[in-house]
Structures are given as structure tokens and as C-alpha cells.
Image (cartoon, grey):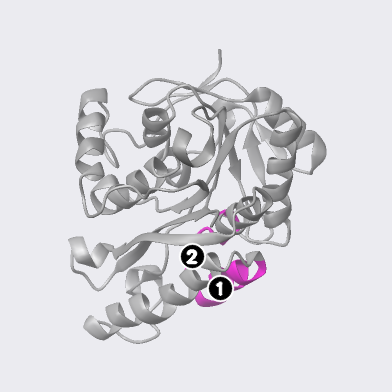
């Protein structure tokens, strides 16, 4: 069976299973831990685990359904949206095989992928020709840990009008195949500093405060409103999301799944961990029902 091998294990996150599990257990004990509720989808960051792993881990853990909230104990497939893409980029999806993680392989839901790619214009890529993307790979160990029996659909989504179409079509396709799914969108927030070519308010504490309370806050508000057009516009115009297409697809998918509210689990910046004139924002956000 063809397999997508790890590219960031041992650098961006642990390469050994025991080390991954130890780190995950630590993340789960931080702050208020995972959220409780009936959540269909979530937005996660994708920096190295030392920076944003806690937020991503607790967000994905919050998507595990419970008998009390959803009536379901099994998730068949995780749909993961991500990838650094331009507005004109062609969306793509992994076709078959499996994805390697330190905690074991995740099988690709080939039937769901085929049905999705048959429904809309999306490029199919085999595991061996699939791009190395931290936006996607940093989530794989969390997905394997919290959804050990689930399959996966991995899709790169450009920040265009097509993003919400991909999100809603993925849900329609999953429903047609009677798949129980959870949807995850991967994006970091503002990349600020000369190293990123983005310094609209100078440097120092004022810049950090502007990112937190203005620039990232506006992007989070768009995501909380589940307004896919506003999400894409924020990312392209204000540079406050590196993967607004993935976020827009996730918001659209969440609405299609019946989500009516957003819950902000956490927000942080790399400045909190490593103060520097170049820093990045991270958020964990969940979509669910009232």
C-alpha cells in the first residue's frame, strides 16, 4: 500500500510514539483542557508543537463525540483542510493509501475521496506525490491519537470562492456515503515582523498588542460568524490567516453539518513562548450546536 511518509517528525514534533503520547497528555492538562459539547468542526494552528501544539491538541480532542452530547461514539472519517496556497492555486486531495505517523498509519478514505473528486474539480495526488505540508502533517498524530480507528480525507484548499464549495460538498458526499465525520481546518494567524515582510505598526509591545486585539481579532470574528466570504477577505486583505481557504471550507462545512455557534477555545502567539520582533498568532476554535 502506498504511504505518505513523515517530513517533520523529530523536528516540529516528536518522532517516537511514547514521546508523542507524553506530550499529548501534557497538552491535555493545560489551561482548561478540551472543551465539552457537540462540536462538528474546528480550526487549529500548525506551528511546531512547542509553540502551538497545545492549542491544536486540545481543539482536536474537543471534537471527540460522546454518547451524552451526540448519540455517536464512532467517527468514521476526519476531513482535514489546509495547505499554503494562493488564490489561483488548484485545490488537491490525497487519493489513496495511508499516512504515516509515529502513532501508526492513518488510512485514506479512498471511497470518499473518489466521490468528492468526481463531484467537483479537484486535483488528485497520490501519497508519494503529495506535498510536504506542516499545515497538514502537524495534525496527523493528534488525529491518530484521538480517532484511532478513523480514516482521513486530506485536502489543500485555496483562498477563493471555491473554498466553501469544497467544504459543503465534502459534507454532502460524506452524508451520501453515510460517513460520520469531523472536519478540521488548519491555519495560523498573523505572521508579523520584518522576517515575514509585514510590519504595519512597527515593532515591540505595541505591535504584539495590535496583532492580538486588532488584526487577529478581526479574523477570529469572521471565523466565529462562519462567514466564509469574510474569512477569505480577511486573510487576503489583512494577512491575518496563512490558510484562509482551509478556514472558509471548514466554516462552510460546519454550517452544512448544522453548527450554529462558535466556541473560542484558546488564542496565543509565539511571542508568548519566545519574545521576538517576528511572531505568529495561533487560535483554536470549535463549531457546534446550541
Residue count near mark 2 (Cα–Cα under 10 Å), binned few <14, some 14–19, many ≥20: many
The answer to whether 97 is drawn above or below residue 283 in the figure is above
Would residue 112 be counted in the magenta stretch? no
The answer, for residue 213, to whether it is visible in the render is yes
Q: Position of residue 248 (x, y in %)?
A: 61, 59
Q: Position of residue 267 (x, y in %)?
A: 33, 63
Residue closest to the eye, 43 or 118: 43
The answer to whether 146 is drawn above or below residue 45 in the figure is above
The answer, for residue 185, to whether it is visible in the render is no
- Which residue lies under the disc numbered 2? 241
Confirm or deny contact between disc 1 and disc 2 (CB under 8 A): yes
Residue closest to the eye, 230 or 49: 230
Q: Position of residue 283 (x, y in %)?
A: 39, 60
Q: Which mark is residue 181?
A: none
Would residue 245 be counted in the magenta stretch? yes
The answer to whether 139 is drawn above or below residue 265 in the figure is above
Residues rendered magenta in the picture: 229-246
Q: Quadrant of the N terminus?
A: top right
Residue closest to the eye, 30 or 90: 30
Q: Is residue 42 left or right of residue 153?
A: left
Q: Which sits earlier in the primary sequence, circle 1 or circle 2?
A: 1
Q: Position of residue 128 (x, y in %)?
A: 55, 26
Q: CA distance from mark 1 to mark 2?
A: 8 Å
SS for tag 1?
A: helix
The residue positioned 47% from the left and 21% from the top of the image is 149
Please identify the dominant SS of the magenta region.
helix
The residue positioned 20% from the left and 30% from the top of the image is 19
Figure quadrant of residue 63: top left
SS for tag 2?
A: loop
The residue positioned 45% from the left and 47% from the top of the image is 135
- Which residue lies under the disc numbered 1? 234
Amino acid at each position: 500500500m502506498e504511504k505518505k511518509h513523515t517530513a517533520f517528525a523529530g523536528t516540529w514534533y516528536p518522532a517516537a510514539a511514547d514521546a508523542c503520547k507524553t506530550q499529548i497528555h501534557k497538552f491535555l492538562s493545560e489551561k482548561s483542557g478540551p472543551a465539552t459539547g457537540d462540536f462538528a468542526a474546528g480550526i487549529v494552528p500548525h506551528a511546531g508543537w512547542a509553540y502551538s501544539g497545545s492549542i491544536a491538541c486540545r481543539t482536536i480532542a474537543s471534537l471527540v463525540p460522546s454518547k451524552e452530547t451526540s448519540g455517536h461514539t464512532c467517527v468514521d472519517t476526519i476531513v482535514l483542510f489546509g495547505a499554503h496556497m494562493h488564490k489561483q492555486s488548484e485545490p488537491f486531495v490525497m487519493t489513496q493509501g495511508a499516512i504515516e505517523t509515529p502513532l501508526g498509519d492513518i488510512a485514506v478514505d479512498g471511497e470518499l475521496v473518489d466521490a468528492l473528486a468526481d463531484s467537483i474539480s479537484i486535483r488528485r495526488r497520490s501519497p508519494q506525490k503529495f506535498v510536504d505540508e506542516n499545515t497538514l502533517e502537524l495534525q496527523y498524530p493528534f488525529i491518530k491519537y484521538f480517532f484511532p480507528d478513523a480514516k482521513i480525507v486530506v485536502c489543500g484548499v485555496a483562498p477563493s470562492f471555491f473554498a466553501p464549495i469544497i467544504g459543503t460538498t465534502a459534507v454532502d458526499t460524506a452524508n451520501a456515503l453515510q460517513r460520520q465525520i469531523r472536519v478540521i481546518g488548519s491555519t495560523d494567524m498573523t505572521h508579523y515582523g520584518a522576517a515575514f515582510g509585514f510590519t504595519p505598526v512597527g515593532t515591540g509591545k505595541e505591535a504584539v498588542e495590535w496583532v492580538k486585539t486588532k488584526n487577529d481579532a478581526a479574523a477570529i470574528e469572521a471565523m466565529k460568524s462562519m462567514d466564509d466570504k469574510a474569512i477569505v477577505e480577511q486573510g487576503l486583505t489583512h494577512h491575518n490567516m496563512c490558510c484562509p481557504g482551509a478556514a472558509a471550507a471548514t466554516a462552510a462545512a460546519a454550517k452544512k453539518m448544522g453548527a450554529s455557534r462558535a466556541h473560542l477555545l484558546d488564542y496565543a502567539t509565539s511571542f508568548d513562548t519566545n519574545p521576538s520582533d517576528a511572531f505568529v498568532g495561533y487560535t483554536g476554535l470549535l463549531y457546534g450546536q446550541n
